[in-house]
Image (cartoon, rainbow, N blue to C red):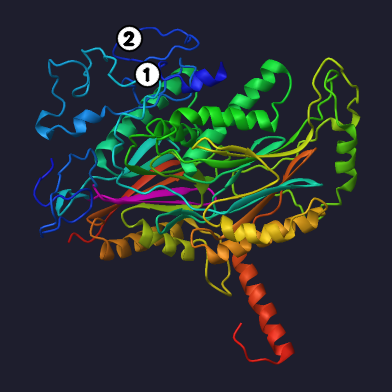
Amino acid sequence: MALQDLCNFGDIFQESVGTARNVMAVGQRKSCSYATGVALSNSTSLFHFYIPEACYLDESPIQFGQISTMQSSSGIPSQETLPIPSSLPESLPFTSSQVVPLPFPMAHGTTTLAFMFQGGVLAAADTRSSCSGLVACPASQKILPIHSHLVGTTSGTSADCALWKRILSRELRLYQLRYGRRLSTRGAAKLLSHMLHPFKGTELCVAATLCGWDGGEPDDGCRAHKGSEMDHGESRETTKAHLEKTAGAPGEKVSVSKTQSSSFTKQQCSRRKISFSGPSLFYVCSDGTRLEGSLFSVGSGSPYAYSILDQGVRWGLTVEEATSIAREAVYRATHRDAYSGNFVDVYHVTSKGWTRRTREDLKEEYYREKEKRRLERERRGTTFPG
Amino acid sequence: MLSAQGFGGPGKMKEYHYAGAVENRFSPYAFNGGTVLAVAGEDFAIVASDTRLSEGYSIHSRDSPKCYKLTDTTVIGCSGFHGDCLTLTKIIDARLKMYKHSNNKTMTSGAIAAMLSTILYSRRFFPYYVYNIIGGLDEEGKGAVYSFDPVGSYQRDTYKAGGSASAMLQPLLDNQIGFKNMEGVQHLPLTQEKAVQLVKDVFISAAERDVYTGDALRVCVITKDGINEQTIPLRKD
């Protein structure tokens, strides 16, 4: 199974033993042992996680590295000794091992939001990546496209989010190749949630919302489409004059994938379940939460964003109105939350795929707002401070 | 290696008052200081680092540069814990060789960056304490800079400072190269000579204010003609 591939920690390449490793058996789970930091090419799993044997941290440094004759886990195994399976429980390789205290802070703090409306799903996020007081990057990307019809907002540790999104893209692509259809957003959320589950209790921190458009693939004779919904959504899409497709940050490509959806069949297959097609929004968190909804905001700035969104979001919004509400919500959150700021990214997912609006600098927005307030004050003739 | 007295953890001063029962745990990390900087231009890239290797109040070496040449078009700068820097560069070199042998071509800068991200993340729960910055030329011959955090999050930038003086240098680079927070200034593209001069000036400033930066500056300029290295002296105090 694809899931076992990644989370199977028994599949650890042991260089010192020099065994040729077969493709891992399903369900086989060896207990935690040392792995090299080098993920070598004959492994089918993307990561070998190096988990330190915590007991050496308690020993005096003088004995550090000495191999004692005692059972298993003392010192670091040298080339001669075989890595002995430790006494850690098999199912949860991480929980008993003490985490090495880190000498540096990780990147955290953000404002991301996503909501559904008649025109699809809109996702917006700020771009500040902060590291306990220092802005590590003012122009990071917090909304990552996963495939042509699925976009994920990320919150938490940026390294974790970037890597797990990559893993998710890989798994969804494998699913598509194996089963001939795209996995639904609900399925992708479940997959991500289950992939993160073995790391529950560790310091992994991922809080993502998956925004996607399901269905609409041709050659799907046995899937019933809610055809009326699709037409409904497409006809209401107004011209997206302001949604430019730009190159964004260097090295990034923005694409709008055209689905073949205009000529899908509307057959009903009575033997199959009626499957949903249309916009879809899920929230997945590394502590195990998986929720379906129509409006989410995640991150340190989310309370401020929620107040704007709760006021304005309705199903019947046009695309321009929805974009302006999303932008406003992120703008207010960046104003009040110290850990959010810099730019705002807005992505829009429709039946045709995702499009990205040009990244906008919020600093200009503050000055525009200040100017507006000043003009209003002059007009009204009051002397209150702005 | 570790002087037990006066060592209160990486980069911290030990407190000399009674603070209750104190447990001195062995920490597998140490902070060896140093600053790395990289700038990408139109057809060149610059990676510069100071050469001081310190620990606590001591200087281990005045000639330990932190730029490592990976390929003819890529240089990596690693600062943080020197032990992890050495191991990481060894691992990267080995992976480069493996790639060369199996694919019969040299890895591009972008590919090295992506590979380094997965190498760093494989140690998510016992990270390499290294702040990496890769500078080089991309496939089109333009300058590219990739900056990393210790667990593998990375992105492509135009300029980046990492290491002990990064918080001081990054705003200066934002202003001089990114023209941020300046009004009415013409945005001139950065020439190679101006970039090298800027890097030298910036490191001189860093050496003034950061104790872990100084001794000498090693600048590597990467162009399509190869990698050119210069060493400029800095403050030794």
- Within 10 angstroms of label 1, few (less than 14), some, or many (20 or more) residues? some
**Residue beneath label 2, please?**
A18
Q: Would you say A69 lies left or right of A86 here?
A: left
Between A200 and B79, the one lying in front of the other is: A200
Q: Point out residue B3 in the picture as x, y percentages from the top left corner.
A: 10, 45
Label 1: chain letter: A
Residue A271 lies, with reference to residue A164, above or below; the image says above
Q: Which mark is residue A121?
A: none
Q: Would you say A127 lies left or right of B99 here?
A: right
Q: Point out residue B173 in the picture as x, y percentages from the top left corner.
A: 44, 61
- Check disc 2 and report its element: helix, strand or loop: loop
Are the numbered discs 1 and 2 placed on the same chain, yes or no? Answer: yes
| Three-letter code, disc 2 | Gly
Residue A259 lies, with reference to residue A208, above or below; the image says above
- Check disc 1 and report its element: helix, strand or loop: loop
Can residue A361 be seen here? no
Seen at 53% across and 53% down, the residue is A110
**Stretch of the chain drawn in magenta:** B32-52
| Three-letter code, disc 1 | Glu
Q: Point out residue A242 in the picture as x, y percentages from the top left corner.
A: 78, 56
Q: Would you say A173 lies left or right of A167 here?
A: right
Q: Point out residue A16 in the picture as x, y percentages from the top left corner.
A: 29, 14
Between B99 and A278, the one lying in front of the other is: A278
Q: Would you say B202 lies left or right of A348 here?
A: left
Q: How many marks?
A: 2
Q: Within the image, what quadrant is residue A17 found in?
A: top left
Q: Which mark is residue A90?
A: 1
Determine if the magenta segment contains residue B41: yes
Quadrant showing the C terminus of chain B: bottom left
Nearer-N-terminus badge (1/2): 2
Please name which of the two marks, 1 or 2, marks the residue nearer to the observer: 1
